[in-house]
Amino acid sequence: MIVEVLLILVGFALLIKGADILVDGSSAIAKKLRISEIVIGLTIVSIGTSMPELFVSTTSAIQGSSDISIGNVIGSNICNLLLILGLSCIIHPVKFQKQTKLIENPMSIILSIIFLIMCNINQDVSRIEGVMLLVLFVAFLIYTIIMGKKSQDKEILEISLEDAKKISVVKNVALIILGIVGLKIGGDLVVQNAKIIAIALNISEKIIGLTIVAIGTSLPELVTSATAAIKGDSDIAIGNIIGSNIFNFLFIIGVSAVITPITYNISYNFDIIILFIAMILMCIFPFIKPKDIMSRENGAIFTLLYVAYMLILFFK
């Protein structure tokens, strides 16, 4: 048991470091090509923090562990919203932009409802439904890039041609490959050893996916949002959470289902309802005092809800 726990920790370390290396290498290549920083931030960096979830869920799907694949995504989204955003707000209150409270918050709920309906129709996510999720993800990505460019007034990347020439393509391609290898090995270690622990403790793969695996793969979001909150950068703190959650539902489940159809356990409906409650609260908070602010009190409510959710999972 101790060996398996240590291997899971090694897996988490590889997932986090692999994502970090992948983002660094990809960002450098993007700068070499003089791609706008806002586009880099909205695509490479935000997707990079969700790479651990992607590799764990796809690995689980390939190995036939649908409960870990689905549980990782739902659990990560609940962890992102209640625990990570909650703790970030306790550290420093975050401000809602008009676009976030009027468009992105409701959009998150609508996309989650689509996901819930899709999963409950035949209690699975087929390859065709996986493709549909990926199409929705592309549409969301296009929307995000367009809105990002507008908000930044089409900011041009501040890097000279001389500096761009100094960036080594070979070195950064090697970093990208190294990051992907680290993510693959880390994902395998987490999934395989989580399954062993679940069997040994007679705990369902669903609980393992919703808790240990979900929290572990959410560590990049925790570091990103907590750091942003400390610096008072509300856009990153909230945007990282909303973006990651949508990415998890649409892209990760979409890719996993395209690789191999995923069986959906209807008991996950309870967990998605918890997620809906959290998203509805996040829609309400900007409209009550203090308006347009998620206060420390709001953050404490989210954090306590997460603790209560964990207790329900283990003792229900």
Image: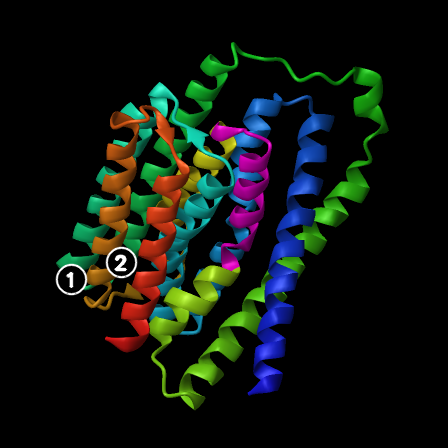
At label 2, counting other C-alpha atoms closer than 10 Å, the crowd grade (few under 14, some 14-19, many 20 or more) is: many
Specify whether residue 55 is in view.
Answer: no
Q: Residue at x 42, y 49 (%)?
A: 80
Q: Name the kind of residue labelled 1 in the image.
A: Asn
Residue 113 counted in the magenta span = no
User: Residues under labels 1 and 2: Cα distance?
Assistant: 9 Å
Image: magenta residue range: 217-234
Please give left or right for residue 242 compared with residue 268 in the image: right
Specify whether residue 267 is in view.
Answer: yes
Q: Horizontal and vertical percent for residue 271?
A: 26, 60
Residue 123 figure quarter: bottom left
Residue on which the image places disc 2: 126
Q: Secondary structure at mark 1?
A: loop
Residue 37 figure quarter: top right
Residue most toward the left?
A: 121
Q: Residue at x 53, y 51 (%)?
A: 51
Q: Horizontal and vertical percent for residue 66?
A: 34, 69
Residue on which the image places disc 1: 122
Q: Residue at x 51, y 9 (%)?
A: 153
Relative depth, front residue between 285 and 64: 285
Q: Which mark is residue 251?
A: none
Residue 233 counted in the magenta span = yes
Overall secondary structure of the magenta stretch?
helix
Q: Quadrant of the C terminus?
A: bottom left
At label 1, counting other C-alpha atoms closer than 10 Å, the crowd grade (few under 14, some 14-19, many 20 or more) is: few
67 w.r.t. 247: above or below: below
Circles 1 and 2, Cβ within 8 Å, touching? The answer is: yes
Q: Residue at x 61, y 21 (%)?
A: 36
